[in-house]
């Protein structure tokens, strides 16, 4: 314990207590995040039961290959994050920095794919927007091209498909915002790791940052089937 | 320090399992199972989430206090969704008295 005396804040008895308090506090924050996304998920459930055809049509417009690939990318980033925490626990500074960098890279790949998907939806006029300002920008909701067959096949009213895309953009957008914040946290962890702040006795920030990143992964684990896999693709 | 260090092999196994479940949930979406498609998708998602929480997030090796917080969080989420749905799904069961203005928007089952 004498190796890292400066890492112990004065209000804690020892590093163990400090570590547990840190994880506990992060979990309490994550519970508020569960409730935040939970509100979106329950609103989604209600509108999905009301406008099922519209949701099936909207879901079939999405690119299932990009969605599944992105799920794999995010799961891989969770794995590298878990390995980063393990490297911190075992005092391997180089490995910790490498795994943090890899996690950030995979996070950026995810956001890049998400950008491509958003752009596709923009081109197909699927951004839910009705005001005059939107149509001036060529952004009004007026599906065209490849977006049309699923809507016709489901006989879905356009307004219902539009509500699906409101949920799609808001939920994936909130998720992407959390990822951007996560990448910011990891940049900070990377810089601290480079300075050699973390030791097997003191690595709580890495552990707590990992908890946040895994939570964001879990949100996507639910978003993928709920947004991309409605009604089946058979 | 008593902190549990999970073996690399365990992390690799969980990673492989999560990838396999992602492939499974995508594959199942192409098979017609009727209403069971949604059940399967949600069951697989819950399984994946539990794997991440228990192993990647170390809840399996965490103190009881942390576990209680995690369980309380998901219990509250269940209350949120159950009570909201028990309202919306039962609104059409009892007709409004004649003369009342009823919303045609929120009437599940009366599409």
Image (spheres, rainbow, N blue to C red):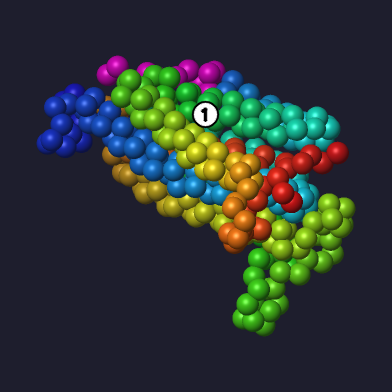
The chain ID associated with circle 1 is B
Nearer the observer, A222 or A197 = A222
Q: Quadrant of the N terminus of chain A?
A: top left
Magenta stretch containing residue A122, yes or no? no
Between A1 and A116, the residue placed more toward the observer is A116
Q: Residue furthest left?
A: A10
Among the 4 quarters of the image, the one containing residue A173: bottom right
Q: Which residue is mark 1?
A: B52
Q: Residue at x 33, y 44 (%)?
A: A192
What's drawn in magenta, residue-wise? B1-11
Residue at 40 percent across and 48 percent down: it is A185
Does residue A186 lie above or below A93 as drawn? below
Image height of A79 relative to A63, above or below: above
Q: Is residue B42 left or right of residue A85?
A: right
Point out residue B17 in the picture as x, y percentages from the top left corner.
63, 24
Residue B30 falls in image quadrant = top right
Q: For the C terminus of chain A, which image quadrant? A: top right
Binning the other alpha carbons within 10 Å of mark 1 as few (below 14), some (14 to 19) or many (20 upward) gives many
Element at badge 1? helix
Q: Quadrant of residue A49?
A: top right
Please tell me whether residue B2 belongs to the stretch shown in magenta: yes
Say if A163 sits above or below A225 in the image.
below
The x, y position of residue A31, in whole percent, is: 40, 38
Which secondary structure is most common in the magenta stretch?
Answer: loop
Q: Position of residue A58 (x, y in %)?
A: 74, 53
Residue that appears at 33% across and 20% down:
B64
- Residue A132 placement (x, y as % from top left): 64, 81
Residue B97 seen from this side: yes
| Residue under the point 43% across and 19% down | B60
The residue positioned farthest toward the front in the image shown: B98
């Amino acid at each position: 314990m004498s190796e890292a005396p400066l890492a112990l804040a004065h209000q804690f008895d020892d590093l163990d207590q400090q570590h547990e308090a840190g994880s506990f506090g992060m979990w309490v924050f994550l519970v508020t995040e569960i409730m935040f996304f939970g509100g979106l998920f329950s609103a989604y459930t209600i509108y999905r039961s009301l406008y099922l055809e519209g949701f099936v049509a909207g879901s079939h417009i999405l690119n299932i290959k990009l969605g599944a690939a992105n799920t794999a990318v995010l799961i891989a980033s969770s794995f590298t994050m878990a390995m980063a925490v393990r490297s911190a626990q075992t005092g391997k500074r180089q490995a910790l920095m490498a795994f943090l960098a890899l996690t950030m890279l995979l996070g950026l790949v995810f956001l890049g794919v998400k950008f491509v998907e958003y752009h596709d939806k923009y081109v197909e006029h699927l951004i839910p927007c009705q005001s005059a300002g939107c149509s001036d920008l060529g952004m009004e909701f007026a599906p065209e091209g490849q977006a049309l067959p699923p809507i016709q096949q489901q006989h879905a009213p356009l307004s219902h498909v539009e509500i699906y895309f409101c949920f799609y953009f808001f939920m994936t957008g909130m998720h992407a915002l959390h990822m951007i914040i996560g990448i910011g946290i990891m940049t900070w962890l990377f810089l601290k790791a480079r300075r050699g702040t973390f030791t097997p006795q003191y690595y709580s920030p890495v552990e707590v940052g990992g908890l946040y990143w895994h939570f964001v992964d879990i949100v996507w684990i639910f978003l993928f089937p709920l947004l991309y896999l409605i009604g089946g693709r058979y | 320090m008593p902190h549990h260090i999970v073996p690399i092999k365990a992390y690799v196994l969980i990673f492989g399992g999560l990838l396999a479940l992602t492939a499974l949930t995508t594959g199942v979406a192409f098979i017609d199972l009727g209403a069971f498609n949604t059940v399967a998708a949600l069951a697989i998602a819950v399984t994946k989430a539990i794997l991440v929480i228990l192993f990647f997030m170390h809840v399996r090796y965490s103190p009881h206090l942390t576990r209680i917080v995690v369980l309380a969080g998901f219990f509250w989420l269940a209350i949120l969704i159950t009570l909201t749905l028990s309202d919306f799904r039962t609104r059409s069961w009892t007709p409004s008295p004649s003369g009342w203005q009823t919303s045609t928007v929120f009437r599940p089952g009366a599409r």
